[in-house]
Image (cartoon, helix red, strand yellow):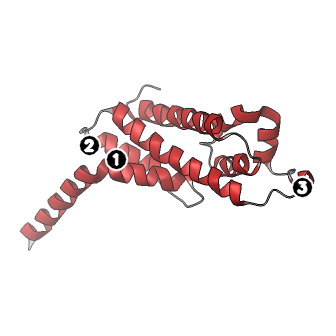
Amino acid sequence: MLEWVTTFISNLGSLWADSALLMLFITGFLSATLLPGGSEAVLFATLDLHQFSPLLAITVATLGNTLGGATNYALGLWIPNRTEGRKRGLKSLLWLQKYGYWALLFSWLPVIGDAMCVAAGWLRMKFWPSLILIFIGKAIRYAVLTALFYGFF
């Protein structure tokens, strides 16, 4: 019986190691949408495997998270853009109206960051400048988390 449990745990560990980058991409994507996700924990678990370079892990997490931000942007495009008077009040909208595209560097922030990507689409901000700044902000986030994991701070 004990041998079966040991084999199962070993196989589960191998499965995790084989699919770690895919899981990192998926959780990065999900955590950037309005769904809850734990991309930080999966990033740390992936780094702890010592099978992939930190740069690869940062890149995969950033790409998944950026795709999630782009999905939020696209959702914002679907929201009817009826009147200018309705574009007031939300903190994410205020940031975007005050700082423009540069506010999207903070799209990694919990709660407000997701809303900021949706608001960028709703405000009909240009897609490519928005996507580039979302990507940069999220890349910095994962780079800092990786540095924390390795004890650089």
Residue type (three-letter) at the residue carrying disc 1: Ala
Horizontally, residue 30 falls left or right of residue 88, namely left
Specify which label sits upstream in the sequence, 3 or 1.
Answer: 1
Counting every numbered tag in the picture gives 3
The residue closer to the viewer here, 76 or 115, is 76
Residue receiving disc 2:
49
Asked whether the beta carbons under mark 1 and mark 2 sit within 8 Å of each other, the answer is yes
**Quadrant housing residue 13:** bottom left
Q: What distance separates the C-alpha of mark 3 from that of mark 2?
A: 51 Å
Residue receiving disc 3:
83
Horizontally, residue 123 falls left or right of residue 28, namely right
Quadrant into which the N terminus falls: bottom left
Assign a secondary structure to mark 1: helix
Q: Residue at x 74, y 60 (%)?
A: 79
> What numbered label is drawn on residue 45?
1
> Residue 128: percent from the left, percent from the top?
61, 37
The residue closer to the viewer here, 104 or 3, is 104
Q: What distance separates the C-alpha of mark 1 from that of mark 2?
A: 7 Å
> Residue 24: percent from the left, percent from the top?
39, 49
Residue type (three-letter) at the residue carrying disc 3: Thr
Horizontally, residue 140 falls left or right of residue 53, namely right
**Classed neighbour count for the residue bearing mark 1: other residues with Cα under 10 Å, few (<14), some (14–19), many (≥20):** some
Q: Residue at x 50, y 56 (%)?
A: 30
Q: What distance separates the C-alpha of mark 3 from that of mark 1?
A: 46 Å
